[in-house]
Amino acid sequence: MCGITGVVQLRRSRERVDPALLSCMRDTMTHRGPDDDGLYLNERKTVGLGFRRLSIVDLSPAGHQPMSNEDGTVWIVFNGEIYNHRDLRPELERRGHRYRSQSDTETILHAYEEYGLDCLDRLHGMFAFAIWDERKQQLFFARDRLGKKPFYYTTTGDTFRFASEIKAILADPRVRRDVNEEALYHYLSFLVTPAPQTLFAGISKLPAGWAGTLDQKTGKLTTWQYWDAIVQRPEHWRRDYFDEGWLIEQIRRHLSDSVQRRMMSDVPIGVFLSGGIDSSTNVHYFKEFATGPVKTFCVGFEDHQQYNEFEYARLVAKRYGTEHHEILINQHDCAAYLPKMVQSQDEPISDPVNIPLYFVSKLIRDSGVIVAQVGEGSDELFSGYSGYLQIANLYLDRWRYLQQIPALLRQLLYRGGRWWFGRRGTDLGIEYLRRLAHDEPIFWGGAVTFTEWDKARLIDPAFRARLTTRSSLEVIQPYYDAIAQQKPESDFLERMIYVELKLRLAELLLMRVDKITASVSIESRTPFLDHQLVELAMNIPWQMKIKGRTPKYILKKAVEGLIPHEIIYRKKMGFGAPIREWFLKELGETLEETLLTSGIRERGYFDYDHVRELIDRHRSGRGDTSFQLWTLFNLSLWYDHWIAGAR
């Protein structure tokens, strides 16, 4: 975990990079790298790179960045880990590249020199990096395949800026702060803005699995996708991928290799243990390769113990003899954390899990551990969410047949359904009928807060009139189109998962992990998201992921005999936070005051009579609107801090 930033003045610009400003940009991210810092400016001072280091691999000064090749013509700043860097090194040395360190950063440099832009195909890990090639006068940048590390950028005038966090870009006073209204519309649905947009007008984020180049001479910016989760079926697909024994062997091998790779570290490393199947599997394989005691960490709620999983985490900790650590938090801790949360997120990531994630991350750092393995990605790849099961069954039992009804009848069904569901307050039922009537996919994502039906009542008509977007379907439809075109034989569940990997996983789940863990100076690693395991899982057929009413079937079979049986087959709780309950108490007062007095109200985006209705419905106990309120609450806090507060 490190922080990278940089500035490139295009050839036609008369400006030069200001080292003091570049240092200021870099040092907004001291939390990402408290151990070391560095700057590089080329001779003409038209290019500057900044770096903050969290020392994990090769703790010596030889790992200092920005780092150059042997003759100083190529420079890199890099955030992440390349797990196969030792495997790549011998071949690069045979080809004449001379190493001066044991760091994985240097391997990226030499791989770029040797293979050019194709070096990405050889890198196995999580990364965001930028390479300045003085000979070509070109900047080359990339984000890892699944999107574990962020890369933000903007071009204003003749200046290109990039960074690991938006706050570094905003440290330059010439960067204007305003709301990206198109992104705001989509944020309301997906709890986060979809790449390449951010909630800041003019600032973009590189999508997962994408790379880019900037030609300093011409100013031409080019981005492209170098990897995708659309994996073509191998010749042996029908023979082996329906063979339970073969799949179990493959999953175990990939998980074992993945956890072992992610133990690469010269500093203490531990595991976030919730007591679920994913984190418990991480502990099992971690223990297999650990040379000392395994350190595990868990968080719970003091005032709402029904959310706690301590019992199961302790069972696993006892089974493996781990050095186990726990922390309890309450709504007062939540309220106190909110300002730091807004600062750490940069743009809203409206998942209440950010709260417990922060406190368990802080516990990890306070315990002397710098790297932690987490379980993200397993529920997406192996269909562990109950929502997947419900949608899949709805599709199988009704939806695919209803789609065959003539369009006029579906429109009539929608009109009648609006009245019927409206009387019962079932807004989601109305939304499903709307999608059916308009030939839209039933599944928009595993976490959708405001549907199009909801937004029709929330958004002020004047705001809607000036939007060029008319539906957040335009965000997910290209993903459905891509997999339908490139892999027409893919089943419904695979298409759902593909959409999840492109949006919810990359921009919500992985960014909450990156930003919150980085805020306390630890690095998170995700063994279930090794790209080779992802490629295997994407070809596992529906029938092996969901069998009957059992989600995550093949993963559960794969870990039978490895972790306790009661962990595998207990009811899934999920990592959450008691926002519903907290909004009924003191935090609800903070919520109401913030929503109704926020500066964003002046922008005329929302119908605040409807916002008031959402507040009243929840606080009176007539309905649970906590996630919609949390989404608006995060947005209001963000606006007051980053937009109104900066004026």
Image (spheres, rainbow, N blue to C red):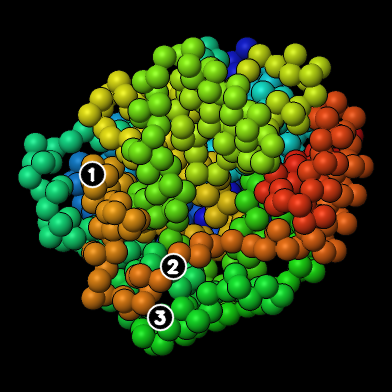
Task: Give the residue number, with chain letter if any, for mark 1.
Answer: 541
Say which label, 2 or 3, has the lower sequence index.
3
**Which amino acid type corresponds to the residue marked 1 in the rendered image?**
Pro
**Which amino acid type corresponds to the residue marked 3 in the rendered image?**
Val
> To which quarter of the image does residue 583 belong?
bottom right
**Residue 529 x %, y %:** 37, 51
Decide: is 47 above or below 77: above
Comparing marks 2 and 3, which lies closer to the viewer?
2
* Neighbours of disc 3 within 10 Å: few (<14), some (14-19), many (20+): many
**Residue 471 x %, y %:** 60, 22
Task: Give the residue number, with chain letter if any, for mark 2.
Answer: 571
**Residue 409 x %, y %:** 48, 16
Residue appearing at x 39%, y 23% in the figure: 403
Residue appearing at x 76%, y 63% in the figure: 582
- In this rendering, position of residue 601 left or right of residue 63: right
- Tell me the element at label 1: loop
Residue 170 can be seen, yes or no: yes
**Residue 523 x %, y %:** 51, 60
Q: From mark 1 to mark 2, how far is it between C-alphas?
A: 23 Å
Say which label, 3 or 1, has the lower sequence index.
3
- Tell me the element at label 3: helix
**Which amino acid type corresponds to the residue marked 2 in the rendered image?**
Lys
- In this rendering, position of residue 357 left or right of residue 461: left
* Neighbours of disc 2 within 10 Å: few (<14), some (14-19), many (20+): few
Task: Give the residue number, with chain letter if any, for mark 3.
Answer: 316
